[in-house]
Image: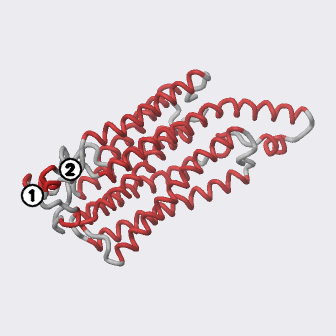
């Protein structure tokens, strides 16, 4: 599009920018604070919780419990429950979903409606795979004795990753609604901004996981 | 709405009137990259993730491990934000909004952890 045509389609807002996109960026900025607080709370309590777990185990063993019983009572250490290869695959899935998302946007911007639909569906499926992996991981942790209430590590871990999972779930619902819109012929090049806004939200969810994967999973006390 | 439109000397523009072939670019925005570039960025992200996981299993000094992991994570973060979220190409105002939120989150993060004597290790 040349400059004259671009100027013609400049939106009549005080900033010249679309208010919906502006609002989305403001929302994402507020989400930075939300997840920043949750990650800070996790890191704050992780160390002390680990010390408490080890002390509790020592006390339980001196009271006559076996190591396995003491582990069950005190809750597991971080290193005993995290499965890095499995979580790496989940992280990879979410990263690749960002690629399919941006390919969906590129497709709808050139009015390739079928291509956009396929990429949106692929993104939603990768998101569902990620959530399924998280559900499996949570179940495994629970079987190892880690629950929301067992200690502060469990509480902060489940709140942080659970809120992220909830965000991914909302993203999947948005993506599936876009697929339905596309099937009904309501998703065209003219409203490609709808896909772009959904994409911004989805990529944000991805970058939050980039931070969580490093700070929670790879850097352990 | 402009003054000319209020006076009635100019027809107000509506979003729906934009031709179907046009993809809107606001002032200060550049054209977004094509699919090939997106796939290249995706490949780079996959490689960096592989490096992160590989480094995790290396038996190296802890401070070095943490530093390398943080750098790699920042690279991934930046690639997604700049290319996939188009901050490299879009209006600077969006960057200011996002960086503002990110800066506040980082300040909160550092203040909480340092005041309560906690850290990454």
Q: Residue furthest front?
A: B7
- Identify which residue is drawn at 8% across, 52% down: A3
> Residue A41: where, in percent of width, then height?
60, 35
- The local crowd at label 1, few if under 14, some if 14 to 19, many if 20 or more residues have their Cα within 10 Å, is few
* Element carrying mark 2: loop
The chain holding disc 2 is: B
Q: Where is residue A163 in the image (x, y as percent from the top left)?
A: 57, 50
Secondary structure beneath label 1: loop
Give the chain letter at badge 1: B
Report the residue marked by disc 2.
B26
With A138 as the anchor, is B106 left or right in this view?
Answer: left
Where residue A160 appears, as percent x and y from the top left, is 58, 45
B106 over A21 or under it: above or below:
above
Q: Mark 1 points at which residue?
A: B9
Decide which of A189, B57 is in the foreground and name it: A189
Q: In which quarter of the image is residue A6?
A: bottom left
Q: Indicate which disc, 2 or 1, sits on the residue closer to the N terminus.
A: 1
The image position of residue A204, as x and y in percent, is 42, 48
Q: Nearer the viewer, residue A219 or A201?
A: A201
Check the picture and name the quadrant holding the C terminus of chain B.
Answer: top right
How far is disc 2 from disc 1 in space, using C-alphas? 25 Å
Front-most of B46 and A24?
Answer: A24
């Amino acid at each position: 599009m040349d400059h004259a045509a671009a100027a013609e389609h400049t939106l009549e807002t005080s900033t010249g920018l679309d208010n919906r996109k502006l609002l989305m960026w403001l929302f994402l900025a507020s989400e930075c604070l939300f997840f920043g607080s949750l990650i800070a709370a996790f890191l704050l309590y992780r160390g002390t919780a680990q010390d408490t777990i080890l002390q509790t185990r020592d006390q339980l063993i001196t009271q006559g419990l076996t190591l396995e019983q003491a582990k069950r009572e005190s809750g597991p250490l971080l290193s005993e429950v995290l499965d890095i290869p499995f979580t790496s695959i989940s992280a990879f899935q979410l990263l690749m979903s960002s690629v399919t998302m941006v390919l969906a946007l590129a497709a709808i911007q050139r009015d390739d409606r079928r291509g956009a639909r396929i990429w949106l569906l692929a993104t939603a499926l990768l998101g569902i795979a990620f959530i399924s992996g998280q559900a499996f991981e949570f179940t495994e942790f629970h079987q190892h004795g880690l629950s929301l209430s067992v200690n502060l590590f469990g509480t902060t871990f489940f709140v942080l990753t659970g809120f992220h999972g909830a965000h991914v779930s909302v993203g999947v619902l948005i993506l599936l609604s876009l697929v339905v819109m596309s099937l009904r012929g309501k998703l065209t090049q003219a409203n490609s901004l709808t896909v772009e806004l959904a994409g911004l939200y989805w990529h944000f969810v991805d970058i939050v996981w980039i931070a969580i994967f490093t700070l929670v999973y790879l850097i352990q006390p | 709405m402009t003054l000319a439109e209020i006076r009635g000397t100019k027809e107000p523009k509506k979003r729906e009137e934009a031709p179907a072939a046009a993809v809107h670019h606001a002032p200060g925005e550049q054209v977004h990259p094509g699919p090939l570039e997106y796939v290249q960025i995706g490949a780079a992200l996959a490689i960096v993730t592989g490096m992160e996981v590989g480094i995790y299993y290396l038996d190296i000094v802890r401070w070095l491990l943490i530093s390398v992991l943080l750098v790699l994570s920042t690279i991934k973060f930046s690639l997604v934000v700049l290319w996939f979220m188009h901050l490299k190409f879009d209006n600077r105002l969006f960057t200011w909004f996002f960086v503002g939120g990110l800066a506040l989150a980082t300040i909160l993060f550092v203040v909480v952890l340092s005041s309560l004597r906690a850290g990454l290790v």
